[in-house]
Amino acid sequence: MKLLIKNGRVIDPSQHINEKTDILIENNKICKLGKNIRETGCEAFNAKDMIVSPGFIDMHAHLREPGREDAETIATGTASAAKGGFTSVCCMPNTEPAIDNQSIVKFILEKAKKEGKVNVFPIGAITKARKGAELAEIGDMKNAGIVAVSDDGNWVENSALMRRALEYSEMFNIPVISHCEDRTLSGKGVMNESYISTVLGLEGIPSESEEIAVSRDISLAKMLNTRIHIAHVSSEGTVALIKEAKTCNIKVSCEVIPNHFTLTEEVVNGYDTNTKVNPPLRGNDDIQAIKNGLADGTIDVIATDHAPHTITEKEYEYDNAPFGIVGFETAIGLALTELVHSGFLSLSQLIEKLSCNPAKILGFETKGTLKIGADADITIIDENKEWIVDVNKFLSKSKNSPYHNRKLKGKVVATIVNGKIIYKD
Amino acid sequence: MKKEINIKWDRKDLLGLEDLTKEEIKLILDTAESFKEISARKIKKVPALMGKTIANLFFEPSTRTRISFELAEKRLSADVVNFSASTSSLSKGETLIDTAKNIEAMKIDCVVIRHSSSGASYMLSKKLNASVINAGDGTHEHPTQALLDMFTIRGKKGRLEGLKVAIIGDIRHSRVARSNIWGMMKMGMDVRVCGPKTLLPVDIEKMGVQVFYNIEQAVKNVDVIMALRIQKERQGQSYFPSIREYSKLYGITSERLKYAKGNVLIMHPGPMNRGVEIMPEVADGPYSVILDQVTNGLAVRMAVLYLVTGSKNEGGTSV
């Protein structure tokens, strides 16, 4: 089984390649790179005027299975991911029950093998039932296939426990991903704390609830000389803290979600519950700081935090509606529009943050690269294609997106997983 | 009374005062003047909304607002249905939108809604063809309360422009304060807010108000003092150490009235905690217009119901 991708502009930051070249795939692996490869008896894909990139890896997503199959399943979630150009998806453990033991990990991997369109990598919980009280069986889960641990949605408030988690996870060489939020400060907040929350009469979540948590986590990583990955950075202060930590050689990495470089809290005016997300949409200064942080390398990764919720749930009042925005199918369009076409990032930098860097953080040696012998996971994009977001065309089971009718520039045209074209626009 | 009202109202809903213009607020207050007299008649009823159906949806306990709206509707000859639930729609397993669609299916002309979530009336209005009147949504707005407050002040002082008002208490959790700030600022009043810092929402001064933590300074030379109800459960949430300390720092006492102008008006949206945010001698004293507020509430709500529900098709109706 061979596949030849012809005439595309290949951008692979892992090998510093950025040129028009062909790629030959054989036996699910990258077999050959070169100009004008001639190969008979194989399927060919003409990528003329398109960008060919190592497959995008989303290290922060919610597939909702098991537990909330009404909002998303592994089948629908991975179909949505494929449409969005993601060849690998890491699913967060806030399922019902939580991914906190090897049997749930095995269930997800089995389901993904049967029904998944793209590679699925479960993230295990740090603590049992994500309750922040006792460590989950991280060793067992690692053997079963987890690639990271996180109590997603919950910050491990107990500092001693977080210390143990960092120490213990290091033995298995998997990153600890921290949802940084001091709940005692964010309280019942539903949006950014500001003049707008005052006017709307909605409880606010100050940026400091994130920054306090980030500070502690950085301190622990420094003390223990272990890695820490900060999920969904939303504020100017957080970017500054991480930047400083990196200059001190503390092993901190972080990700940002397109929502936090695209939308400000202004869109909460009108009480559209599709704008309710945690961390909340913040101000213009925060967006600028995040864009600068992406450009200067402070922010390593762009993830989606794909968070499906049913229409019914999002029809509750703003206070009562759940947090979350679906992200797979808009992430690349938003990133190209807001970051590349507006001049903050080069295409190569963008691909680093969508593919190479997540692979490095997660320890994927054969992904996030187009080196000979690497897994044939490839994303092909048309950086200039203009399109309008239509939630009704989402392959995700859920439609909770504030981007409906938004015009974007840049689209995924094909997604190749393990040498097979699994999505074509 | 046969008085022509020149109608310039073209809104489907009344959701808050933030969106209204000065002229629209004035129109409501002027309309309320002509309705005030009806409640003093022997037969307290006019046929202005005959044949209209109004649903009062109260998802949060309320006595005076609910009764005030219901009386206003009945005095305008509307058909009235009441729906009260002390819990939000969520706990019944039905969304607000579902509730709204059910109401719509019953061909109702206007919905008056009180809800504990900010934005509930806004969400409802987007889903309904019927008119929506916000009778208080979370900590967002309570427009008819602010309108009746301004109506009362205007009635007593003859004007609004240039008057100084101090709103005292839990501004943070007060929809009454927000609506009054929007309305009073638009009408050219000088608005001060005062309370413990813990009960003032962030950036409140951007609404155009002056912020005070000291009550004597706040009420100095003001024409109007408005005390807000302090909810006793806030004590447990550490907004202040005790009701006792709150009352000592921010209670409206006759001693504190001396800092204000000699003919100051004392207002309270009710229900009052006598002896906490307002002392009984002040609430019942010569400066108090607290019961006038209640009386005027009826006229203002009649005006709002009339403008929102009745005036859309027929221009220049006499009442």
Image (spheres, rainbow, N blue to C red):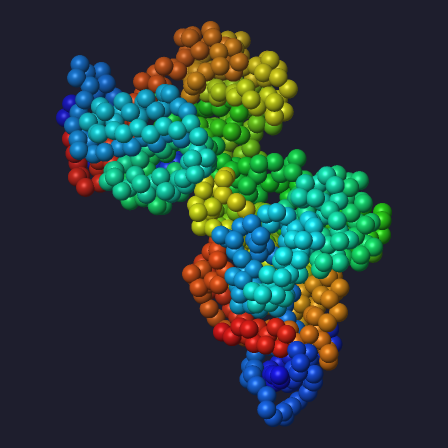
User: Foreground: B36 or A132?
Assistant: A132
Rendered residue at 62%/81% (across/down): A9
Quarter the N terminus of chain A occupies: bottom right
Rendered residue at 48%/28% (across/down): B174
Rendered residue at 53%/65% (across/down): A79
Q: Looking at the rendering, which quadrant does residue B263 occupy?
A: top left
The mark total stands at 0
Is there any visible trace of residue A198 in the rendered image? yes
Image x and y of residue B156, in percent? 34, 18
B156 lies above or below A347: above
Horizontally, residue A359 falls left or right of residue B281, namely: right
Image x and y of residue A88, in percent? 63, 65
Is there any visible trace of residue A240 in the rendered image? no
Image x and y of residue A235, in percent? 65, 49
Horizontally, residue B4 falls left or right of residue A378, namely: left
User: Foreground: A421 or B269?
Assistant: A421
Rendered residue at 70%/83% (across/down): A31
Horizontally, residue A259 falls left or right of residue B75, namely: right
User: Foreground: A128 or A160?
Assistant: A128
B262 lies above or below A370: above
B8 lies above or below B289: below
User: Foreground: A298 or A257?
Assistant: A257
